[in-house]
């Protein structure tokens, strides 16, 4: 029998020390199961975001799936298009479009607007009208997340497209967090030079969105296009990880799966050759149905060697600078995800970590090393008193990268101590 692997990515779980000396949301959360696993497993910090990469899920999730984000840059637009099932030809360009909320001066105030369902439906109609098929494809990834695919052809021809496909590098606007305080029209000016057709259609949509006014958008909304790129070409997950194959039963299917709601995580998994089914009830927010995700993961574990579980909520709470909500969600994750997984599959090796720090103090991502724990068959004891940032740092164990952490997870084999990774050995 092979050892199944469960890798939980609690997006933005880690936080920075608070100015007021209060505990971080993870330290404040009531997490008896995570604390027990930390006290009996391998615990430390992992430098998931490499030097030179922007701190965010775009780098952190690929790293935890074993891909060096500097060698395999993952643009959100095409990954989310994959997750949405939008066809993506090699020269098509896919864009992530955030719905941003405006302030009384018409400037961008909230880079990820919180929308009522009726508003979402109105925006979806405006986006569909502004980007008609067949020249464009659109998808709504839930909430403020939209994807627009610009089909290669006459309408998509733009000065930024060089002739050689190998050199295709579309102009990428700044992320939505970096345009707070600017007017959408001013901030989009550079897009007009590089992608005039897309700029014209975004401007048309924004004229309508600016006039929307409701309790969720008192000063109107706008689309902010970013994260653009072409169809990704990631080497398949199991081609990269023969160690995972060698540790499984010869007859066991060499497949991996992703349980996630947000299109970025699902699209990335699909680009890597993992299956990533849609999970009813998984919302990508703090209200997500953790029992549904647990059930989906347990079902996938019956015929997949590796199951990743991505939970977006902690990141969302931290962006909203709501430390209490982040802590409450981590408490719920401990009870409704980690505890039932551990109880149902004691034979599985369980890893819990996150892709990057999201600090409730400033609502932003940070590249600092993040806590991880590894528990189950073959995991060598390197415990911490509990599972929080300070306790994990105090163990002194530091894994240098996301791919190195995945390697450690995949190469740890039950009942074969010689093949297990000694966590105290130096990693490079
Ligand atoms: Zn985030």
Image (cartoon, rainbow, N blue to C red):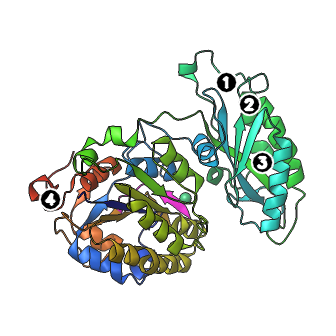
Mark with earlier residue (3, 2):
3
Mark linked to residue 184: 3
Asked if residue 14 lies in the magenta stretch, the reply is: no
Foreground mark, 3 or 2, reads 2
Q: Which residue corresponds to the image point at 31% horizontal and 52% vertical from the top-left?
A: 406
Mark with earlier residue (4, 2):
2
Q: Is residue 142 left or right of residue 209?
A: left
Mark linked to residue 424: 4
Tag 1 and tag 3, C-beta contact below 8 Å: no
In the picture as drawn, the residue positioned furthest to the top comes out as 163
Q: CA distance from mark 1 to mark 4?
A: 49 Å
Mark with earlier residue (1, 2):
1
- Residue 360 visible in the shown view: no
Mark linked to residue 160: 1
**Residue 181 in the image: x percent, y percent?**
72, 55
Foreground mark, 4 or 3, reads 4
Comparing 242 with 217, the one in front is 242
């Amino acid at each position: 029998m092979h050892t199944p692997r469960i890798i939980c990515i609690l997006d933005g779980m880690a936080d920075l020390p608070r100015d007021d000396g209060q505990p971080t949301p993870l330290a404040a959360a009531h997490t008896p199961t995570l604390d027990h696993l930390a006290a009996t497993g391998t615990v430390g910090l992992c430098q998931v975001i490499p030097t030179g990469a922007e701190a965010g899920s775009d780098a952190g999730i690929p790293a935890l799936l074993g891909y060096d984000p500097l060698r395999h840059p993952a643009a959100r637009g095409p990954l989310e298009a994959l997750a949405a099932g939008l066809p993506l030809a090699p020269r098509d360009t896919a864009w992530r479009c955030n719905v941003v909320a405006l302030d009384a001066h018409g400037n961008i105030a909230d880079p990820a607007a919180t929308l009522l369902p009726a508003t979402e439906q109105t925006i979806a109609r405006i986006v569909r009208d502004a980007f008609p098929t067949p020249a464009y494809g659109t998808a709504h990834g839930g909430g403020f997340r939209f994807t627009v695919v610009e089909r290669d052809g006459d309408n998509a021809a733009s000065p930024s497209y060089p002739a050689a496909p190998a050199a295709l590098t579309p102009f990428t606007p700044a992320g939505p967090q970096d345009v707070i305080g600017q007017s959408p029209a001013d901030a989009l000016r550079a897009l007009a030079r590089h992608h005039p057709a897309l700029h014209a259609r975004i401007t048309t949509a924004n004229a309508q969105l600016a006039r929307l006014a409701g309790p969720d958008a008192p000063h109107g909304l706008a689309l902010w296009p970013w994260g653009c790129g072409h169809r990704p070409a990631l080497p398949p997950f199991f081609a990269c990880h023969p160690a995972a194959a060698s540790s499984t039963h010869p007859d066991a299917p060499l497949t991996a799966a992703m349980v996630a709601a947000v299109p970025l995580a699902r699209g990335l998994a699909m680009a890597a050759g993992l299956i990533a089914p849609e999970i009813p009830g998984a919302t990508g927010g703090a209200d997500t149905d953790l029992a549904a995700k647990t059930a989906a993961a347990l079902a996938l574990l019956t015929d997949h060697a590796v199951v990743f579980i991505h939970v977006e909520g902690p990141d969302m709470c931290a962006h909203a600078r709501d430390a209490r909500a982040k802590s409450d969600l981590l408490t719920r994750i401990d009870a409704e995800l980690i505890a039932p997984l551990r109880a149902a599959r004691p034979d599985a090796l369980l890893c819990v970590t996150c892709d990057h720090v999201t600090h409730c103090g400033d609502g932003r991502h940070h590249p600092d090393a993040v806590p991880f724990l590894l528990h189950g068959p073959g995991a060598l004891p390197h415990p911490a008193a509990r599972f929080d940032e300070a306790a994990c740092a105090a163990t002194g164990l530091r894994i240098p990268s996301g791919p190195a952490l995945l390697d450690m997870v995949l190469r740890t084999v039950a009942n074969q101590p010689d093949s297990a990774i000694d966590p105290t050995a130096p990693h490079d």
